[in-house]
């Protein structure tokens, strides 16, 4: 049976500090993509994404957002386009691309529907429309099914909250006003559910965005659209795009409609998809795909900034081997039933369509087609453990000494994970060895921070950087105490 490969294109929350710095040393596609995006950013007066990504300082998500929300969105868009080009230059012919939320712009661009310049212009124009909603609404991930989330929303009596994203059978994202979301989060924590406020500038996929659709359509109009060269499946439309669709209208309407990623994964899995690759930073989409369709193979080449080259080379070898066996299918037809056919033996990289004769850019733009990256044979390296922060001596009255703290963490994690405590040594890799995903890790850390009355981590905090109990202990010992609660009147 042929193996169908899906390229999962993540949304805005996927930005990872340090991403693409290593891949840039090996793959010319990174600079080729960002030279185009930088030009578009300059036309809109935004700081250049390449300087933000590859400058002397590695910026956290919060720092980049503070620098420029438009630059933040362009960096995520560019990272996904670069990842798609690297993968297809290595010979991959995806069965479909699937963009999540904001990721649909990059998926349509990588699928040939827009030039890179056109896709970047859409990103900038869309950001200008949504800027009016910054800070008004927020989004929160819940470790619960859609039914549980809806019952919880009904129980707190807040009709202004909406299910924004269905990411996995037991994971949804809720969108709505700040005050209502705070009540939902409090109720969810009382039920011991996973809760995580997303660090996004606005709460999209909410019915309130209907008022912006007409403005968004007018603002995005005029960007040249080209015939798709690859199948693009929309978790918002719940179907494949066709060339008869007006892609900019679909993007304009998407912010007011929910994302059904779970249904998308199930549909594609039912058609034979068995390999899902995160074509962008992070690994949120492939993790959710695994939770939805157990047994699939997943890859996330940009998940660890220190291992980008090794992971791309691993995929190149897998792609080359699969092509030699003629097991990777060509692009799927636009509607089921799907006949999975083997691809030609020669690599067929994506060639993005050139701009229309009357470009929308106001200054000429020189572009160079991407050069196919050779397939190397260097074996992949195991991801190294993140460097631990410095340990403070003045741990504070609520925190025990490090040895006692480690023992408390061991007992707490063992109980929560249903593992014998002896399985949890100081250097045990929680995810790699025990399978603790970032959602569970975040929930456990939140309780630990509350127990020791510590200030919660800032918005740039990445839970997956703390892979062992030893690193978590160091984090707790270096964290400041929480501000005292104001006295009641």
Image: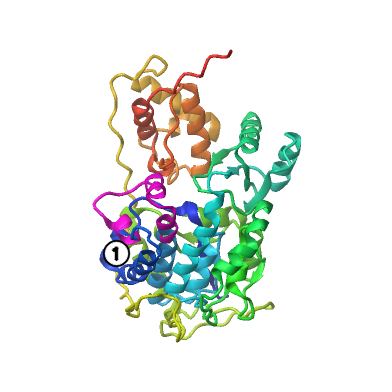
- The residue positioned 29% from the left and 69% from the top of the image is 377
- The residue positioned 66% from the left and 66% from the top of the image is 237
Decide whether residue 304 is among the magenta residues.
Answer: no
Question: 456 or 319, which lies in front?
Answer: 456
**Category of crowding for the residue at label 1, using alpha-carbon neighbours closer than 10 angstroms: few (below 14), some (14–19), many (at least 20):** some
Q: Position of residue 417 (x, y in %)?
A: 53, 35
Q: Position of residue 83 (x, y in %)?
A: 40, 66
Q: Is residue 261 above or below residue 416?
A: below
Q: Which residues are magenta?
A: 49-74
Number of callouts = 1
Q: As drawn, is 13 to the left or to the right of 239?
A: left
- The residue positioned 47% from the left and 18% from the top of the image is 484
Decide whether residue 62 is among the magenta residues.
Answer: yes
Question: 448 or 1, which lies in front?
Answer: 448
Q: Is residue 393 above or below residue 466?
A: above
Overall secondary structure of the magenta section: helix
Q: Position of residue 32 (x, y in %)?
A: 32, 72
| Quarter in which the N terminus is drawn | bottom right
- The residue positioned 33% from the left and 44% from the top of the image is 385
Question: 351 or 379, which lies in front?
Answer: 351
Q: Position of residue 44 (x, y in %)?
A: 40, 64
| Quarter in which the C terminus is drawn | top right
Q: How is the image coloured?
A: rainbow
Residue labelled with disc 1: 24
**One can see residue 265 in this view:** no
């Amino acid at each position: 049976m042929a193996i169908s490969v899906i390229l999962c294109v993540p949304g805005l929350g996927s930005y990872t500090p340090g991403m693409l710095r290593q891949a840039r040393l090996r793959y010319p596609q990174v600079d080729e993509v960002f030279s185009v995006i930088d030009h578009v950013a300059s036309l809109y007066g935004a700081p250049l994404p390449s300087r933000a990504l590859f400058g002397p300082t590695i910026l956290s998500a919060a720092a980049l957002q503070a620098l420029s929300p438009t630059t933040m969105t362009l960096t995520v868009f560019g990272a996904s386009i670069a990842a798609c080009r690297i993968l297809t230059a290595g010979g991959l012919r995806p069965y479909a691309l699937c963009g999540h939320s904001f990721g649909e712009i990059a998926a349509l661009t990588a699928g040939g529907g827009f030039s890179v310049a056109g896709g970047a212009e859409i990103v900038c124009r869309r950001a200008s429309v949504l800027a009016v909603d910054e800070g008004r609404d927020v989004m929160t991930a819940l470790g619960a099914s859609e039914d549980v989330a809806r019952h919880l929303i009904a129980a707190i009596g807040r009709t202004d909250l909406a299910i924004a994203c269905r990411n996995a059978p037991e994971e949804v994202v809720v969108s709505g006003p700040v005050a209502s979301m705070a009540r939902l989060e409090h109720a969810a924590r009382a039920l011991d559910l996973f809760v995580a406020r997303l660090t996004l500038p606005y709460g999209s996929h909410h019915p309130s965005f209907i008022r912006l659709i007409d403005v968004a359509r007018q603002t995005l109009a005029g960007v040249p659209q080209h015939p798709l060269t690859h199948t693009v499946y929309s978790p918002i439309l719940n179907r494949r795009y066709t060339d008869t669709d007006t892609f900019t209208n679909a993007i304009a309407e998407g912010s007011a409609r929910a994302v059904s990623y779970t249904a998308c994964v199930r549909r594609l899995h039912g058609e034979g998809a068995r390999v899902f690759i995160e074509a962008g930073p992070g690994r949120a989409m492939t993790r959710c795909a695994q939770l939805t369709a157990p047994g699939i193979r997943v890859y996330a080449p940009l998940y660890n900034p220190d291992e980008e080259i090794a992971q791309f080379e691993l995929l190149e070898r897998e792609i080359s081997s699969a092509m030699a066996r003629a097991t990777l299918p060509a692009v799927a037809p636009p509607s089921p039933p799907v006949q999975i056919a083997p691809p030609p033996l020669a690599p067929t990289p994506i060639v993005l369509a050139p701009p229309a004769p009357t470009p929308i850019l106001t200054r000429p733009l020189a572009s160079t087609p991407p050069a196919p990256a050779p397939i190397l044979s260097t074996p992949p390296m195991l991801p190294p453990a993140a460097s631990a922060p410095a340990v403070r001596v003045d741990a504070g009255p609520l925190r025990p000494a490090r040895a006692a703290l480690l023992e408390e963490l061991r007992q707490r994690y063992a109980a929560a994970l249903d593992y014998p405590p002896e399985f949890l040594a100081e250097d045990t890799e929680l995810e790699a060895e025990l399978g603790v995903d970032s959602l569970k890790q975040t929930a456990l850390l939140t309780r630990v921070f509350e127990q020791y009355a510590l200030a919660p981590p800032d918005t740039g905090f990445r839970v997956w950087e703390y892979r062992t109990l030893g690193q978590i202990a160091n984090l707790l010992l270096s964290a400041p105490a929480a501000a005292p609660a104001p006295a009641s009147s």
